[in-house]
Image (tube, rainbow, N blue to C red):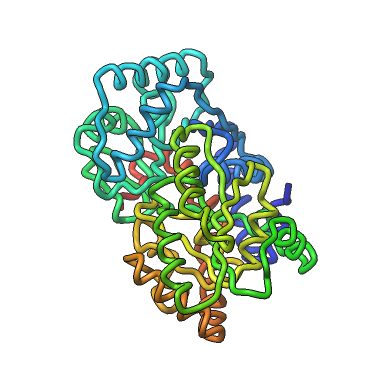
């Protein structure tokens, strides 16, 4: 694990000194993060990097995951899709089971001074706040711009009991009775997924998967989730390949709280089966070096999401100075200024056109990558994220200090 001082080379020593100064204001306070999975997805990745750094700063931080059964996670996946605006049907028995699982987890937990709850799965832990006490924050990492009204009405009864709600982008703000705070996610430049790699390390990964680096490579790294539109990526690739020779890499894994992943991956494999230049790679959780190498060795990176809370894979690709094409949804436009730090796309046809242009215009593609890296350095590194959280935690003990969106 990197030392907090190691980040000075990216952000300057003054920023590191400021983090230590802020952390001292939380002396004697414990911060408990709660989510639904320790493996897979951006939330788990951020917490796995941030908790050790907070401890180095002197903050008593910990991370707990709630436990649930197959029905619970099938229900919360419906919540996830419904909050993204997808039509779903959640039955009364599913709502009740959701509450039962949250109540069971709450009864087994020892709560910190600050309980920082991430996403809908554990939101109802706060149900008995009157008896538990503590300060409570709810962090929503998903695209919340057009939530299903029934699901949101159910969840809002719990969100309203928190001290504040934290969102990733202004478009996700809701009419709430509690303060709303905007904090964008971040990447860790010293993690295995983002650190510098030797050319030998990159080449070995491509050789292992049988991908020809002498030809253009278009890559999307994502969980196999239909909201990431892997089938649309294949269609865009096929359109672009009518004019230019190229290969497509669709690589990613799943998350323990996402039961739909295996079925989506099978659909992707079926669509890709007749083209030897499409590589569908299921990567286990400990594949950060492979992901890093695949991004660094690719010609163009895609993130053709239909809905997106933020899209950390975009920031990861930009940090590696790769020309990136991504869906103009959720928090992605915070990361990409169209035609400056990357490309925002709205359709399969548009994606195909930009793939062809970036492969055909390497100088322009390189400039996009350079601009993207600087944008991430200035806005989306983990040190900025930690500072935002420390300020929010401190504000909980100073009434009136939480800032509204």
Residue 34 in sight:
no
Q: Position of residue 379 (x, y in %)?
A: 50, 64
Q: Position of residue 303 (x, y in %)?
A: 46, 60
Q: Position of residue 279 (x, y in %)?
A: 58, 57
Residue 98 in sight:
yes
Can you say whether 40 is above or below 313 in the image?
above
Can you say whether 100 is above or below 164 in the image?
above
Give me the residue at 35% from left, 35% from top: 163
In the rendered picture of this protein, how many numbered marks are placed on residues? 0
Q: Position of residue 240 (x, y in %)?
A: 44, 73
In the displayed orientation, state which residue is furthest to the right.
200
Nearest the camera: 109 or 321?
321
Position of residue 357 in the picture relative to residue 157 (left or right): right
Nearest the camera: 141 or 358?
358
Give me the residue at 59% from left, 32% from top: 62
In the displayed orientation, state which residue is furthest to the front.
274
Give me the residue at 66% from left, 67% from top: 297
Can you say whether 341 is above or below 34 in the image?
below
Give me the residue at 77% from left, 66% from top: 198
Can you say whether 179 is above or below 187 in the image?
above
Picture quadrant where residue 151 is located: top left
Position of residue 205 in the picture relative to residue 319 (left or right): right
């Amino acid at each position: 694990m990197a030392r907090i001082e190691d980040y000075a080379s990216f952000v300057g020593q003054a920023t590191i000194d400021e983090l230590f100064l802020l952390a001292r204001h939380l002396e004697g306070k414990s911060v408990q993060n709660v989510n639904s999975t320790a493996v897979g997805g951006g939330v788990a990745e951020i917490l796995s990097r941030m908790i050790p750094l907070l401890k180095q700063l002197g903050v008593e931080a910990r991370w707990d995951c709630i436990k649930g059964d197959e029905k619970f996670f099938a229900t919360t996946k419906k919540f996830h899709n419904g909050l993204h605006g997808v039509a779903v049907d959640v039955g009364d028995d599913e709502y009740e089971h959701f509450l039962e699982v949250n109540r069971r987890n709450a009864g087994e937990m020892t709560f910190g001074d600050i309980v920082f709850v991430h996403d809908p799965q554990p939101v109802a832990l706060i149900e008995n706040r009157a008896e538990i006490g503590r300060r409570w924050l709810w962090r929503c990492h998903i695209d919340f711009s057009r939530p299903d009204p029934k699901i949101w009405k159910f969840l809002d009864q719990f969100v309203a009991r928190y001290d504040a709600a934290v969102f990733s982008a202004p478009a996700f703000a809701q009419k709430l009775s509690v303060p709303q705070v905007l904090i964008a996610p971040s990447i860790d430049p010293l993690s295995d997924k983002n650190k510098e790699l030797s050319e030998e390390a990159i080449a070995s990964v491509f050789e292992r998967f049988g991908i020809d680096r002498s030809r253009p490579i278009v890559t999307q790294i994502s969980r196999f989730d239909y909201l990431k539109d892997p089938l649309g990526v294949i269609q865009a690739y096929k359109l672009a390949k009518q004019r230019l020779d190229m290969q497509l890499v669709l690589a990613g894994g799943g998350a323990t709280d996402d039961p739909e992943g295996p079925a989506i991956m099978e659909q992707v494999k079926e669509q890709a089966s007749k083209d030897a230049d499409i590589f569908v790679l299921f990567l286990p959780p400990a594949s950060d070096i492979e992901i890093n190498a695949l991004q660094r060795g690719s010609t163009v990176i895609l993130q053709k999401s239909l809905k997106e809370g933020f899209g950390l894979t975009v920031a990861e690709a930009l940090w590696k100075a790769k020309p990136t094409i991504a869906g103009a949804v959720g928090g992605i436009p915070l990361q990409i200024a169209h035609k400056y730090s990357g490309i925002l796309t709205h359709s399969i046809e548009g994606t195909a056109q930009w793939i062809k242009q970036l492969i055909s215009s390497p100088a322009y593609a390189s400039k996009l990558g350079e601009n993207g890296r600087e944008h991430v350095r200035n806005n989306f590194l983990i040190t900025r994220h930690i500072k935002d959280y420390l300020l929010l935690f401190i504000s909980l003990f100073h009434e009136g200090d939480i800032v509204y969106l």
